Image (cartoon, helix red, strand yellow):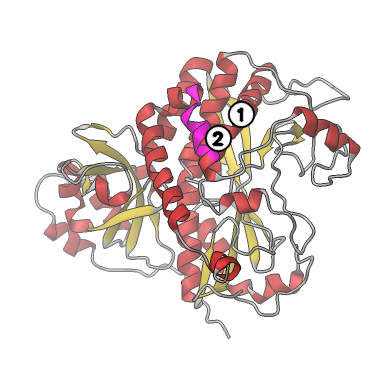
Amino acid sequence: MMRKVKLHVKKLMYSNQINRMFSGGENSELLERASSLGVKYYQMSFVDIFGVQRSKLVPASRADEMVGAGGAGFAGFAVHLKMSPTQGDLLAKPDMSTLKVLPWNREVAWLACDLYWCEKEFIASPRNTLRRVLSKLKQNYGLDLKVGIECEFALINRSGDGLADAFDTQKKSCYDAHALMRQYDLITNIVQAIDELGFGPYQCDHEDANGQFEINFDFDHALTTADNIIFFKYLVRSLAEQYGLRATFMPKFSSQLTGNGCHAHLSLHDAESGDNIVSSNEINKNEPSLSAQASQFLAGILDQSPALSAIACPTINSYKRIYASSTISGATWSPNVISWGGNNRTLMCRIPDDKRFEIRLADMACNQYLYPAALCAAGIHGLDNNLSLPLAAPDGCNMYDPHDDQARAIRTIAPTLPRNLRSALDNLDSSIPLRKYLTDDLVDAFLHLQKQHCDDFDSHISPWELEKYLDV
């Protein structure tokens, strides 16, 4: 029987010791928060180009020294940020609004950091990039972007060669009550933890693939949501380990099962009033009624989708999810035609109601800062150029069905997503709008590192090749 991981707060009586160890001046916010929360260490965190979390543990008693020195130092070459070993340290400066005490280790508080180099904001930092693009949307159009993410993951055994639950075998396993309840302790521990952190979880379920789960929590400002998703992945992996399991966010972890998607729900808000401006409040029988700005924003995303896919689906494995021929459940849930319309999950962009649109493009391997930054950049491109939406898919059109006449008609006029990562990278390389808003520095760093992955894969001899060609 799985042991229950206790998430209750332990009262740690050492604040006086921290105060004695800190020398000089008034207590800073870092020291005060450590004392009030019973925190012994700060985990200064950022992500690399691939979205992988990097961090340093800093004793709470020395955190002010670290901030006074400009931040926690990192070698950029060592963390996939396209820097040379000859260059000086990157400095990670914490954003205090992101402070989260680790539910599985109450002695440590996590902080998202912004990166600086040579006393200037580091251009190729994913978090810096998102803040910069969101600022441009607000500055140019008076709009804020809010985002909600559907987080999908699978529970597997520690060695990675099988599912965590040997009894989770239904072909149509979505919403399987028994499989969900067999993981009750772990799932509810995750929910309890993010609830205590203020994420606002509102539902969780067993997803379409065997061993796959989804936990949903409240949408928020795009940067806040990105910080929360980064922490959520860290938390899920860490709590799964407490149960002797492994949580994977790999896009396509089994050739027979549905992959791990990262469906993004976007809404645009007036920056002053906070009002949602997505809907035009008009009735249109032929397609969803979007405001002029929302329509242009979405048109920009659709226009840039071939380039966006490099960031939304950033691994070689990602395209095995997008172009999966079939799954044992009967659906891939990963549209590959650049399409949009009403409440239809076979489209790349779904308009479920008059407050938001859902982009069903990305997978959970995407960098959770770069992806919303790229979506926002594409949306600004649509606003800058007054782009118009293409023809909407008619109601009832099933883009998964090759025999659906309406779907065939859409396929004749709608482009498809790139077939592989290298093709997606080529599209990103030539995207003037994404280069404009994400900057050449970041795009070139991303392309350089991702093309190395492609080269590594191309030179790898797989078991499939040995099976097929060993005896030719």
Find disc 1 in the rendering and name its residue: 301
Discs 1, 2 touching: Cβ within 8 Å:
yes
What residue lies at 12% left-to-right and 59% top-to-bottom? 21
Image quarter where the C terminus lies is bottom right
Q: Position of residue 77 (x, y in %)?
A: 25, 47
Q: Which quarter of the picture shows residue 161?
A: bottom right
SS assignment for the magenta stretch, majority = helix
What residue lies at 64% left-to-right and 53% top-to-bottom? 321
Q: Amino acid at mark 1?
A: Ile
Question: Which residue occupies the foreground of this view, 106 or 463?
Answer: 463
Find disc 2 in the rendering and name its residue: 308
Up/down of 247 relative to 46, above or below: below
What residue lies at 25% left-to-right and 37% top-to-bottom? 116
Q: Amino acid at mark 2?
A: Leu
Q: Which mark is residue 241?
A: none
Up/down of 383 relative to 84, above or below: above
Q: Is residue 428 magenta?
A: yes
- Point out the tag, 1 or 2, that comes first from the N-terminus: 1
Is residue 438 among what the camera can see? yes
Question: Which residue occupies the foreground of this view, 250 or 180?
Answer: 250
Is 86 placed left or right of 140 in the picture? left
What residue lies at 19% left-to-right and 44% top-to-bottom? 89
Question: Which residue occupies the foreground of this view, 223 or 162?
Answer: 162
Is residue 275 among what the camera can see? no
Label 2: element kind: helix
Is 154 placed left or right of 444 in the picture? right
Up/down of 270 relative to 85, above or below: above
Q: Which residues are magenta?
A: 423-432
Q: Position of residue 445 (x, y in %)?
A: 36, 37
Label 2 packing within 10 angstroms: few (<14), some (14-19), many (20+) = many
Label 1: element kind: helix
